[in-house]
Amino acid sequence: MNFHTRKWVKPEDLNPNGTLFGGSLLRWIDEEAAIYAICQLDNQRVVTKFMSEINFVSSARQGDIIELGMTATHFGRTSITLRCEVRNKITRKKILTVERMVFVNLDEAGNPAPHGREQIRYADEAYERYRQTVTGVAEPAAEREAAH
Ligand SMILES: CC(C)(COP(=O)(O)OP(=O)(O)OC[C@H]1O[C@@H](n2cnc3c(N)ncnc32)[C@H](O)[C@@H]1OP(=O)(O)O)[C@@H](O)C(=O)NCCC(=O)NCCS
């Protein structure tokens, strides 16, 4: 599992108890998972379909740094299933896991469409394909090598 995203817990992310507000964390998770799904499926029209039970086992306080990890656990015909783990870098405790988050690949009419993917793309390849999809411009091989 790759932990690509870190978040710094700020005053606006807190609940009245002074700890990380669950709604803020769920928004970060949904966004991170959506980015992961669109890069894996190479399609911006991907929507959240299902999230399994969420059990907050510990929390975070203002100033803590948390990190979000994602991995694909299943490639369906039109869907992709992800697993998410969030941990606190300061307390070194796990905050939660979401065992199943299902995203559905859509066509231009908003209907589920086969994505044709069967296995995980490494992050660099996934982001590069996504960049090409968004910009419509392929990176020349020389520039790509210079950037790495
Ligand atoms: C996403 C949506 C188009 C899917 O429509 P649908 O009629 O359920 O589509 P299907 O029955 O063809 O299922 C599509 C895929 O989702 C999976 N799926 C459907 N219901 C599911 C559920 N409850 N749990 C897990 N997977 C589910 C199916 O197994 C299928 O995957 P597969 O092709 O890999 O086997 C429709 O439900 C929708 O628009 N939902 C709202 C999405 C949304 O607004 N999300 C929040 C904002 S991003």
Image (cartoon, grey):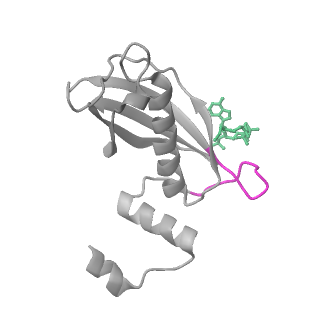
| Percent x, y of residue 87 | 29, 30
Residue toward you, 118 or 58: 58
Quarter of the N terminus within the rendering:
top left
Quarter of the C terminus within the rendering:
bottom left
Ligand 1 resides in the quarter of the picture at: top right
| Percent x, y of residue 11 | 37, 29
Residue 122 is at least partly visible in this image: no
Q: Does residue 109 belong to the magenta stretch?
A: yes
Residue 64 in the image: above or below residue 56: below
| Percent x, y of residue 64 | 26, 30
Residue 79 in the image: above or below residue 138: above
Residue 61 in the image: above or below residue 71: above
Left or right: where 133 falls relative to 45: left
Left or right: where 92 falls relative to 52: left
Residue toward you, 63 or 29: 63
| Percent x, y of residue 39 | 49, 57
Magenta span main SS: loop
At a point 40% along the width and 42% down the height, the residue shown is 71
Q: Give the range drawn in magenta.
A: 104-116
Question: From this viewpoint, which residue is outermost toward the top?
Answer: 17
At a point 75% along the width and 59% down the height, the residue shown is 108
